[in-house]
Amino acid sequence: MRYSFVGLSLALLLSTQVAKAQDPLPATGPTVVKTGGAVHAMVAAANPLAVQAGVKVLRAGGSAVDAAVAVQAVLGLVEPQSSGLGGGAFLVYYDAKTGRTTAYNGRETAPSGARPDMFLGADGKPLPFMQGVLSGRSTGVPGAIAMLAMAQKAHGKLAWKDLFSEAIQLSEDGFKVSPRLAEDINGRPPQAGTPDATAYFTKPDGARYQIGDLLKNPAYAATLRRLANEGPSALYSGRIAADIAAKTHEGPRPGTLTAADIAAYRPQTSDALCRPYRRYRICAPPPPAGGVGVLELMGELERTDIASRGPKDPQAWYEFAEASRLAYADRDHYIGDPDFVKAPVAGLIDPAYDATRAGLIPGLGGAPALAGTPPGAGMAGSDRTTEPGGTTDLAIVDAQGNVVSMTTTVENIFGSGRMAGGFFLNNQLTDFSFSPTDPDGSPAANAVGPSKRPRSSMSPVIVLDAQGRFVAALGSPGGGNIIGYVAKALVGLLDWKLPIGQAFALPNVIGHGDSVAVESGADPAIIAFLQSKGVKVRANAGEESGLHGIVVTAHGYEGAADPRREGIALGY
């Protein structure tokens, strides 16, 4: 982990320090929001430069979706280990005029030549995970830009071509390498050592880029210019698409992605998946996103006394961890691409079913958390999907009250480590189960298949009140832990009535499988209590949370960024 659990005061200090290091807008522009008030509009995201680009679009009269395009373009440059043009995303949009919440699915798709056994070795056993990541088989068709273009066409106010100027300028003039990017450039991720990454991250003197060094990316600027002038087709046809496909055909283990697969990509849209929680309504993207996991977990917690206990009570964290294990067991067992796998979504978030699952919590202890049998359940095998981190999140409210909550990713750190057009390609297909079947022969819901979207934990959410009015937007990166991170923040915000920054800074205590991951620095009393219940506790060695969000206050909006990362919130 990069940061241990820290309090809100340090979170605010970190946000201020990062903003200064990245040359924020002058005092006449937006201010860093810490504990209170933007009146008109706001952006919360993982890097100050990206946030500033989004606020600039909002100040120019742009919509929340317009700003999201600008933020993503900059994040792909300054935080390439987490997201970019070569990745995918899920977005939930709230229309202030109609009150409707819409989900946009920009998840990558497998090529038409993908096969269920493509991550099996010659011995018929699943490949070691990183061998799959670094192979040409790991990259799916990028979906983030097509999804953003679809949403911007429906909800944008500015011209598409005008949304990339900040990212283009930063690419050409250079940006200062942040501490987190420098850590990944010089750290242990195998993708940082690929030929493409090495060429990009090595200075003319042969040394790697360090904190504060000026990094330029003219190839990315050229790609963005084409994207701005030609629209999303610049990425899905022609030279850039051919370059993406060609890169995946290089060894080791070449893939089957073709330019035709890229040209055939279509994002999807639907109503968001919404369910009541106490006096609120939580809306999230449906499968293959992680929203159903968040909603089931919250549905279980609603039937406990966690709200009356508060964040200092170890019993509250026991209830949260065990509910997490039960919700993850169901999610892992049943959820896949709904175009290929019939999942019992309604059954998983049925109040009666969630009450039954919550009833298991008091006596569960260290016993296995097994998948249940929700209404509508069919056959599915136990899942063997590995979900590492390499993701980011953003929340935006525009001057008309429209809201974007978006989580975006290249899957692992620097994706597959392969680059085309100045950006990293995703390794999203390793989000499929490497084994297509269970030992007993039952099919895995998340098995690889041609043109199939892998299951995701990404869970951007929007919270409404009983009258359908906007309350909050938030989400997080974190690999397989995303569902737990988002639910923790929701409990802190909605049940414990904490300010959003304090809700984000709560310790991460995530139950999944046969154990509970507790991050460094959490109250030892929580660990001791879990162990007294027979729960196996392990150090949280996965990707830390990176929550970003915005809430409505009596005076406008309050935004916050997770103290574990480099994000800030800016508003005007």
Image (cartoon, rainbow, N blue to C red):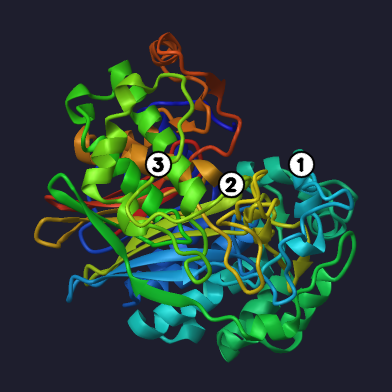
User: Front-most of 91 and 274?
Assistant: 274
Spot occupied by residue 551 in the image (x, y as percentages of width and height):
24, 51
Q: Give the percent coordinates (x, y) of residue 232.
A: 57, 84
Q: Categorize mark 3 by other alpha carbons within 10 Å: few (<14), some (14-19), many (20+).
A: some
The residue at the point 77 percent across, 53 percent down is: 132
Name the disc covering residue 275, or none. Answer: none
Q: Is residue 230 left or right of residue 352?
A: right
Are dots 1 and 3 in contact, CB under 8 Å? no
Report whether residue 29 is seen.
no
Which mark is on residue 372? 3
**Neighbour class for label 1 at 10 Å: few (<14), some, many (≥20)?**
some
Quadrant location of the C terminus in the rendered image: bottom left
Disc 2 and disc 3 in contact, CB within 8 angstroms: no
Mark 2 and mark 3: Cα distance apart in space: 14 Å
Secondary structure under the numbered disc 3 in the rendered image: loop
Hey, which quadrant is residue 325 in on the image? top left
